[in-house]
Image (tube, rainbow, N blue to C red):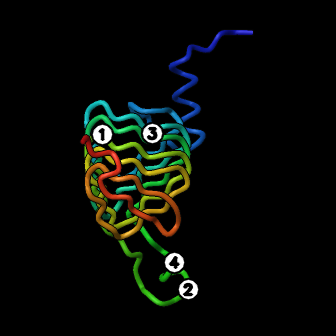
Amino acid sequence: MSKMNFKKFEDYFLQLIKNKKNSFHPLAWINGKPEIGKGTYIGGFSEVNAKGAKVNIGKNCDIASFVSINVSDSHKKCIGLNKKIERENIKIGDNVFIGSHCVILGGAEIGNNSVIAAATVVRKIKIPPYSLVLGNPAKIKKNYYKKK
């Protein structure tokens, strides 16, 4: 059996799963042209969809696996209430932690040094810096991480 080099295998694998190589995790899907700061990590099976709107993710963020950051909302188009997919910008500050299985949707603004707890859904809200956010609907605990 011949050896296949890793680079070639990775290229074939990414082609097979219709993904592009990125600097985060080979199983993170990055669509459109999001702005992602230095030192930010994005885990496997996470998606950052910036097609049709802006996504700005600050520096030194930790985005866990199975996170969806998505500017698009197609449910109204799907059921016939809109003719177009709705798209809104997303802004995530510096030093933000986003836990596994979170959904960050269009219109979200997350302040610096905040934590989004696992399985939280964030949509069309402005979260102040140093906040803890949890649940669906999202509940914001302002200044939870503020140094005293």
- Residue 48 in the image, given as x and y percentages of width and height: 41, 50
Q: Earlier in the sequence, mark 1 or mark 2?
A: 2
| 77 or 61, nearer to the observer | 61
Q: Outermost residue, front direction?
A: 148
> Which is in the foreground here, disc 1 or disc 2?
1
- Residue 129 in the image, given as x and y percentages of width and height: 26, 52
| 136 or 62, nearer to the observer | 136
Name the quarter where the C terminus is drawn.
top left
- The residue positioned 48% from the left and 62% from the top of the image is 121
Where disc 1 sits, the SS reads loop
> Which is in the foreground here, disc 3 or disc 2?
2
Where disc 4 sits, the SS reads helix
Q: 10 Å neighbourhood of mark 1: few (<14), some, or many (≥20)?
A: many
Q: Which residue is mark 4?
A: 75
Q: Which residue is mark 3?
A: 20
Instruction: Give the alpha-carbon distance from disc 1 to disc 2, as whole Å.
Output: 38 Å
Q: Assess whether mark 2 and mark 3 are in contact (beta carbons under 8 angstroms).
A: no
Instruction: Give the alpha-carbon distance from disc 3 to disc 4, as whole Å.
Output: 27 Å
Q: 10 Å neighbourhood of mark 2: few (<14), some, or many (≥20)?
A: few
> Which is in the foreground here, disc 3 or disc 1?
1
Instruction: Give the alpha-carbon distance from disc 4 to disc 1, as whole Å.
Output: 32 Å
Amino acid at the residue labelled 3: Lys
Q: Which residue is mark 1?
A: 95
- Residue 7 in the image, given as x and y percentages of width and height: 50, 19
Q: Earlier in the sequence, mark 3 or mark 4?
A: 3
Amino acid at the residue labelled 2: Ile
- The residue positioned 48% from the left and 32% from the top of the image is 25
